[in-house]
Image (cartoon, rainbow, N blue to C red):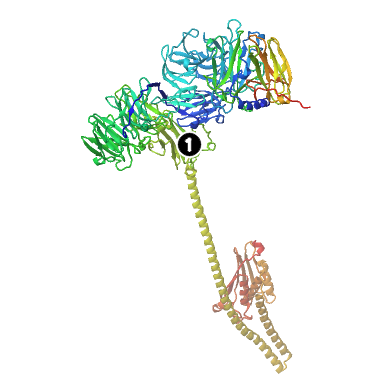
Amino acid sequence: MKYFFKFTLSSFFLAQFIFAQKINYKHFTEADGLHNLYVYAIKQDKNSFLWIATAEGLLRFDGKSFLNFNTKNGLQENFVNTLFVDSLDRKWIGHYSGGITVFDNNSFKILNTQKLITSRINIFFQNKNGEILVGTQSDGLWIINSDLSIKKITTSDSEFPIINDIQQINENQYLLATNEGLISISIDNRTNRYTKKTIENTDYYQIISILKIKNQIVYATEYDGIFGIDFKNSDTYRTYKLPHNLDLELSGKIIFIDKDKNNHIYISYENGNFSQNKLLAFSIEQNTSYNISKDKFSTFCKSMYVDKEDNLWIGTFGNGLLQSSGNVFLSYSNSFDYPQENVTAIAIKADVIYYAIGSELYKYDIKKELYTKLTYHISSKEAQTEEIKHILIDENDIIYISIENKGLYSSSLKKMKFKEFFCHLEDKPSCTINNFIKDENFLWLATDNGAYQVNLSSQNIKRIGIENGLPHNKVYTIKRDSKNRIWFATHSSGISYFEFGKLFKIHSPLENVAVNISTIYEDKNKDIWFGTYGRGIMRYKNGEFDKQFSKFDGMGSDFCYTISEDNNGFLWVGHKNGFSKINIETSEINFYENITEYSDAEVNLNAVCNDPENEVQNQIWYGTNHGLLKFDSENDRKNIIENSNVITGLKLFFNEPEWNKLKVRKQITSPPQNINFKHSDNHFTFEFIGISLKSPENVKYKFFLEGFENDWSLESKQNYATYSNLPSGTYTFKVISKNKDGKWNKIPTTYSFQINKPFWKEWWFILLSFLLFLFIIFIVYYFRTLNLRNKNALLLNEKLKLEYEISERKIVENKLQESQRLLQLSHDELNEFMWRLYHDLKSPLKSIRGLVNIALAAPPKIEDSQKYYGLIGLTTDKLDAILTDFSKIKILTDFEFSNDLIDFKVLFDNTISQIKLKHDLTNFSFKYLDQTKSENFYTDYSSLEMIFNNVIRNCVMYASANPIITVRIKSYSKFVSILIVDNGIGIEKIALSKVFNMFYKASERSKGTGLGLYITKKYVEIIKGEIGIVSTKNKGTMVRIKIPSIPPLEIIK
Amino acid sequence: MKKNKPISIILLLFNIICTAQQVPGKEENIPYLVTFSKDSEKRWGDDDFSQTWFYVIPKDTKKPFYIRVYDPDVAGKIDELKADANSKTKFSVFGGKGCYTDPDATNKDPLGNYKSGTLLNSKVFGNQPEFDEKWFNFGPFNPTEGELINELNGYVFKIISDGLEGNDGNLYKYFLSSSSISNIPLEGANLFTYEYTFRVDEKPGSISHVYPFVDENVISVNINTFDLDDDSYMRLVSVAKKGDKINGSIDNEWAISNHTISNEEKKTSLDIQIIKFREKVNNNLVLTITNQYGKSLPFFSIPIGGVPKYKYKIGIK
């Protein structure tokens, strides 16, 4: 038959297998930066950094990346064999060839062990005094003091061939685990001398580890199990084997034992088995078993460490590092290999999981940890290979499965005989059934062609499509809530529900957005959640959509495939890349990424189930493309450990600062603090990390720069902060972080620094600048003033020049005028002179002519002739005198000044002597009064002689009876005053103003030429002097002459 | 390192052909290695109560490996017990600097600093039936824990068996394995020794072989045997020797047999055959081979270049 598939469970082959429970490790390899896959030791420091010893260096892990240190960074050797973090947070690094490096105070220090220890360092141990004991492979036991000096304790290497572990029993007594038994050694603290005693019956054993758990000491042998030892005193002890439920035979020899902070004992076995165990009083009980060998990681666990957040770190030998962060998620598959098991549908009933892998059906008994493959046969070969889309088990233990394009099948759980559900119906749905639910007596189907309501009693089918008000015929999922509403999620975000026989359409925020509703979930508060393809999830509460979460709010993705709720009330949204855990109350979201070891693990659409009514209610089961995935809320403990924040880097303008130029030593793991930066270094990027090894991808940060900002930044995952154009000042960068469970740091991590003021903001520079400004103002003022002065001077000079030129011109003009006046005067004088000359010469000449005429007319008598000749002679003398005066005038025109030293007395005497030659001076009384001072007086002697001669001669010529002539010479600072006084006839007052004119004769008695005083005045003017005359008629005349001293030039100099 | 040059050539060849690292090798027809304890008599077949084997792990090997010892204890039917099993044998694995390059390391006698290098692990075995006829694992070892010898293109380790107290003979075998639970050969790895102390096959007519390798500088070799006894004789086969007689020692004595090496024999393995012609149990033999300068040549458990066959020549007049 066309629509009939003969589906029979032809055989129910019950094959039961132990299911492969796989602890989900994070696996770190070369691709993650772990460049060497041999991990020898793992330790955590106080900053929460994980330190990892490898064969090719030391690594520091911050949860996100590995930082590699090797000899280039200061290690003594690249091969790191063991690690230890002491109480001072110093990292002790033991090398393969005997080297010891200490990482302290952000730098590596190499201990001088090169010639002392040549075998590998196996163990560091810090005793109660803080000293470090070093156990070596074949160089015995050493002790390192606080000053890092190292001393050997043991003297015989053959007594201590291999020291694997050290434990302190009391003040001076230690237990050494060696490959030749357990050795008790007592060390004298002062001398370092020791006494050794092998614990009885242990010398055949290779002792590999010693642990001290509370007051109990246990030690592990390679092959003979784990023992306890109790000391009554240093020499009395009791050893006993610890019974256990460990299968040592199966696991092989013990590699090491170690403990965590909770005093769990971890045992590593040769064949990759690894277990966490509890130490009871006299036995060991296994808690959790790990098998990294079966998980294909490694066959050998070399080292382990449980960090502050209870992450278990396993160092493998040859395959890197494993991290197990609690068994929150466990993978289950039928294969230890890479499982290609795409679980498309899943259902739970009475602690049994029923699930489909493609076209195959399985069940898994949770309690028995057994899985069974359910083999069945469908008559149609096509249906045999089609994928099972959905599984449902009802309260009557009927199991329903929908097969891609092939309809719905059902069977009882007991019989497991499936038959096609609609085989007898003509109007059965012919399209893919995407999802279905059971609602009392109805089966509701979500198909590509609408929703179907199947009455299980009557077998009636009712289709609900767009004609009934459904937003779209393609129905992705269907859900019944606690109020018996049937919810439909249709194509393009259409949401509607069916209640009381009616269809109600819901107007959602995504109504007009072309995204699909992928899943529907009702939480414990009876609120409906809708998961979408591309827009996160939204809540429908009290008739409205009141909440929406998306990637923006912290979800791992906006594409949601499952929604479920754990018994702690957290909502878990499944994405392709992980799960978003949502605290509905606080809206806080954490994203769980990489929850399985398979990077491509994806949860399938609506492949989720849990049963809140059964014993495993804390579990939620998911179907993934790599088998089943179990979430266990009991293991999802809140992480109350604060992150350790470390400022890992500082960038200036996005580059590493040149620390050398800043005169600070570059520090290896974090930037040096309290640095004074230049004012131009004002662009800072702080890199920091909040270390949460449990969930590094969920760490969020807040930071602020004190001194620049006033408040913290918004929280974000950004682990760097950049500040630009910071002004000078003192700053403290602060950062806090929170872990995935919202635990913030109480105390921020800080980085303090200072940006120096530029020199132009320093007080001294401001002061200097001010002074300089004043100086410049002054200089400007000064030079401007000087310039103005110069200009003024120039102008003044110009003015003076002009004035001088003007004055010169005036002088010239005056001279010209004077010359013109003088010329005129000369002309007048010349006219007068010519007239006077004519007159004076004509008269004598006429007299001489008259006398001649007389003589010619009548020869005179001899006595007359003599008379005539006498007259002619007188007349001739007169002419001669006239001509002599004329010659003196001539001398005036050719005068050359001579600076002669004048002796007035000699001058006076010479003048009197010359006058005596022509005049009878018998009656004359001469008085000479010399009132000169001792200074020398210089002037032209000949001119002064002429002046004296003329003036005194006039006194002689116009003297009265008892003539007295007085000459007084009086000297002043720069001139002399000469007074010549007589008691002669005097001069009319009216004539006084004319006596110095040429040819003027003031008296009838004048026998002269009228040129005497004229010539005198000329001479006085020549020697720069002045002459004045005062006279009273008939009483006398006084001539006053003022003459300056004009010394020769050399005397002036 | 001049002395290693010939070996490096050997090992290049060896790497190509060798995938099994069992000592004694299958081709040798030697049942066990043997180390007697200190109180034993040398005439029982061990001249120095110590035996050293080197193994080279190729440089590019990343996976850990094991050195496995079969029947390491001194008890049970495999060992040569003189009275009660009162002996102890100490097996020590060395790596690190000096493991191979220390001059005393390759000396045929356990003198001086022959335990050079870093002791990686050691274990003393006595009368412990739990190890009887079982494989014991040393390791796993990180290949880089060995001494890097670039000329050998790998990391060198060594394992020394020292007879301690007692007078019994410890018979054992080695296997270099990548697995701790089965013998899985480590690709490209190989083992060699400079003094071979072993148990001779007991069956009359059986032939045991050891395969020293002669390099191109060898012009003659001295084959030194200790305690061959009178139930066997030895001969030398090579590409140029059809079966030269080797002067064998008598009980508790060394014998030296000198042989010239022709050009054809250079860079090939020699086949020293020990032919058992009379039944006698517990015959142990010590063999060393030195070149013309007295320098020891290495024995490989598997013949380099294969088992040497005499090449017949047809003379043409």
The answer to whether residue A866 is visible is yes
User: On the image, which quarter does residue A859 sit in?
Assistant: bottom right
Closest to the observer, A308 or B315: B315
Extreme residue in the front direction: A1
Task: Farthest residue to the top: give it.
Answer: B83
| Residue type at tag 1 | Leu
Residue A1030: which quarter of the image?
bottom right
Secondary structure at numbered mark 1: strand
Q: Using residue B60 as the reference point, say whether residue A291 is left or right of it.
A: left
Quarter of the image where the N terminus of chain A is located: top left
Q: Which residue is mark 1?
A: A650
Closer-to-camera residue (A975/A584) = A584
Check the image and report above or below for A338 versus A650.
above
- Furthest-right residue in view? B317
Q: Give percent across and percent down for residue A469.
A: 24, 40
Task: Estimate the x, y position of residue A975 in percent, counting from the top left.
Answer: 60, 66
Q: Residues within 10 Å of mark 1 (few under 14, many from 20)?
A: many
* Vertical order, A1042 against A1000 (above or below): above
